[in-house]
Amino acid sequence: MGKLGSRVALVTAAVLVTGLERWIPAGRWVLYPFILLTTWVHEMGHGLTAMALGGKFERLEIFADASGVAFTTASPGLSAALVALGGLLAPPLLAALILAFARGPGRAYFCLMALSFGLGASLVFWVRSFVGIVAVPGLALVLALGANVGGGRLRLLAAQFVAVILGLDTVTRMLHYVFIERVQAGATAGGRSDVGAVADNLGGPYWFWGAMVAGVALLLLLWGLRAAFRGGGAPELEGGRLDGETGAELNRAEGAAGRRFRP
C-alpha cells in the first residue's frame, strides 16, 4: 500500500468526518466519543508536560460537555507556561504525527494500538471523572478493534480518521479557545484559560499568545498533511507481501540494477 492508498484513506476519512458532522442527523452523536478523545489528548498534554518538567500530574477529569481539566503542579514562570502550552499543542501535534507516520497498515496499527494503550494507562493512573471512566475504556476498545479487525486498508482509514478528528478540532474548537481569556470546564466557571495562564507567567496579552499558538498549530497540521500526501519511505509489507503495484515497481528496479551492475 503506497502513496495512493494513504492519500485515499486520508481523503475518505475527511469526507466521512464531514458527512457525519454536517449531513447525517445522528452523525454528531457518532463523533461525540471522538470529541472526548480530543479533550483527553489536550488534558494529557498538560499532564505529561508537567511530569516532564518535574511537576506532578494528579488527576484528569472529562465532562459531558466535552470540556476537561488536568490537575497539575508546576513551578511558576516558564514551567507553568509550558504546561499550559503542552495542552494547547497536543492535539495538532498528535494529528500531524499520525498524518506523517501512518502511511501504511503496519504504521497505522502502531498508532492505533499506542493510543489504545495510552488511554488504558491513563484510566489507571489519572482519569477520575464519571464521564472519563465511562468514555476512556470504550475509546481504547474502539481503537484496538480498528487496529485488529479488518484488513490493512481499514487500519489505515481508522488511523487517518483519528488524525482528521484531531485536526478539525484544532481548526474549529481549539482555534476559538486560544482567543478567550476565561473558560468554563464542567461546573467551574470563569477560570483562567490556557493562553491566559501563559500570559500570566510570561507576560504580554493573552491574545498575542493565542495568535502564536494558532500559528504553530496550523503549521503542524500543514506539515502533517504535506507528509501524508508526499508519502515516501520504504513500502510496507501487508500479509507477508508487498502491495502489487509497489512490488512490481521494485522488481523492475531490481532487474534494471542487476543488468546494469552484473559483471
Image (spheres, rainbow, N blue to C red):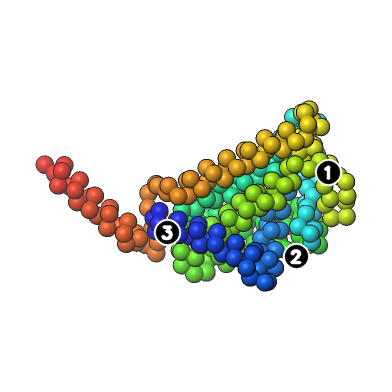
Q: What residue did someone put label 2 on? A: 134
Most extreme residue toward the bottom is: 25
Separation of disc 3 and disc 2 at Cα? 34 Å
Going 71% across and 58% down the picture, which residue do you hit? 36
Separation of disc 1 and disc 3 at Cα? 43 Å
Q: What residue did someone put label 1 on? A: 182
Q: What residue did someone put label 3 on? A: 5
Residue 215 in the image, given as x and y percentages of width and height: 63, 38
SS at mark 2 in the image: helix
Structural crowding at the residue carrying mark 3, measured as other residues with C-alpha within 10 Å and reported as few (<14), some (14–19) or many (≥20): some
Contact (Cβ within 8 Å) of mark 2 with mark 1:
no
Residue 143 in the image, given as x and y percentages of width and height: 60, 62
Residue 139 visible in this rendered orientation of the protein:
no
Residue 8 in the image, given as x and y percentages of width and height: 45, 59
SS at mark 1 in the image: strand
Q: Nearer the viewer, mark 3 or mark 2?
A: 3
Q: Does residue 152 appear to the left or right of 257 in the view shown?
A: right
Residue 252 visible in this rendered orientation of the protein:
yes
Tag 1 or tag 2, which sits nearer the N-term? 2
Residue 31 in the image, given as x and y percentages of width and height: 66, 64
SS at mark 3 in the image: helix
Which is more toward the observer, 139 or 168?
168
Going 79% across and 59% down the picture, which residue do you hit? 65
Going 45% across and 50% down the picture, which residue do you hit? 229
**Is residue 67 shown above or below 210?**
below
Which quadrant of the figure contains the N terminus?
bottom left
Disc 2 residue type (three-letter): Val
